[in-house]
Amino acid sequence: MSAVDATGRRTGQLNTGNLNRTPPRPQTQSTPPARPADNAPQTRVERRQQERADARAAAKSGIEGMLGHVASEMASSDNAVVKSTGEVLQMVLDSKAQVGNLQDIQQLLKDKGIEPAKIEELSKAGVISRAFNVAQGAIAATRFADLAQEAVADPSKLKDGQFLGDLMSQMGKTTEGVLSAMELISKTPFAAKIPGIAGLIGGVAGIVSDIGSMKDGASASEIVSLIGNTAGTLSNAMTVLAPATGGTSLAVAAGLKGISLAMDGVGFVLNNSEKITEWGKNAWNWITGKS
Amino acid sequence: MAKITYDALLEQFAKRSSKEEAQKVLNLSLMRLGLSPQGSYTPDEALQINALILADAAEEMLQGYMGMLPSLKTAMEAGFDLSPDEKK
């Protein structure tokens, strides 16, 4: 393949988006993930990495706080549908996603004093299951981000079947969460802002179905490309949905596009490396619990 | 071992976005890793480049997801069709 150059070096214009260019480091060997040794004095680079890690931890705690805040606000709403949605979000968050099924949630809603008839109505309208998926999706997105950080610390994990399977699993749950949020919006007056919302939802539902129907023994490239395609399709959907979300879905779209780019890149690298034998099958076995 | 060129990675990324956007993402990752955009990379280096892009994108997605939830609340408060859902 002409894309892989075993000997030569290429030059090209550097587009850094108006950022100052850092002088390139002489290429000597592969760059290992920088990890400060125990008890070693911190260099400037190590200190910067530590600061970045601290900032990330603070941001993560802020994100969890934000989700808790939204759940709490929804749970105190006068609107019965919003209130129940908030209660479900809170339950899933409080249980760290250990509430595993709708029966448990319905019971918990009863315990919260919501009338059984109302719970029944909400269930039939799909509110409870979708709120559950939205909360699970938020937790899965958090886990996905954690896994991505692990890949930064140790990029060889991107060659590990179990790791990749976990990444795919979290992307699948995140996608279901986004799909459920779209379905909830489709039942509100805001849906009128998106003329083709039903088709949009159908497209994302198709992706969720694809994730669930991958064949046993799927190859590494199939798994990597499925994550990339899922993120890419979802990114497009989030862009189209922007008028109904006040533009807030555009940030999700940007993140998803980056994920699709990165996964395409991972697939490309692995397809041009000799180290991928059988790990796709292992990943699939892990996902399906067959290992 | 075969190296992966800058152009090859860029070409791959540009399948999902504009070339300019792909270039920006790739170059920022290279800069943070101290790698030159004028060379080719080992598979491990290329994986590291992608891992960094993935991590940044995952954080952006996560923050976007959380930021979208208040809009969901607003939409649902505007009215919600409680007619039975055939799918669920």
Image (cartoon, coloured by chain):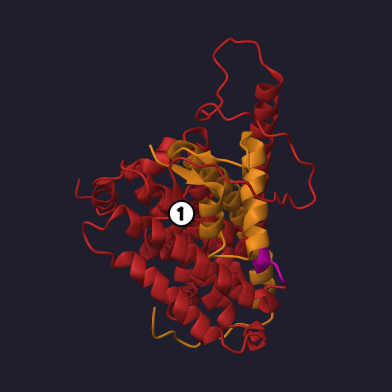
Chain colours: A red, B orange
Start-end of magenta stretch: A247-251
What residue appears at the point 63 percent right and 66 percent down from the top-left corner?
B18
Of helix, strand and loop, which one carries label 1? loop
Residue A266 on the magenta span: no
Crowd class of label 1 (few under 14; some 14 to 19; many from 20; radius 10 Å): some
Q: Is residue A172 above or below residue A187?
A: above
Residue B32 visible in rendering: yes
Q: Nearer the viewer, residue A252 or A19?
A: A19
**What kind of residue is marked 1?**
Ala
Q: Left of B82 or right of it: where is A281?
A: left
Residue A189's x, y, as percent?
65, 86
Residue A242's x, y, as percent?
67, 74
What residue is shown with label 1? A3
Residue A169's x, y, as percent?
39, 54
For the C terminus of chain A, give its image quadrant: top left
Q: Nearer the viewer, residue A72 or B45?
A: B45
> Mark 1 belongs to which subunit?
A
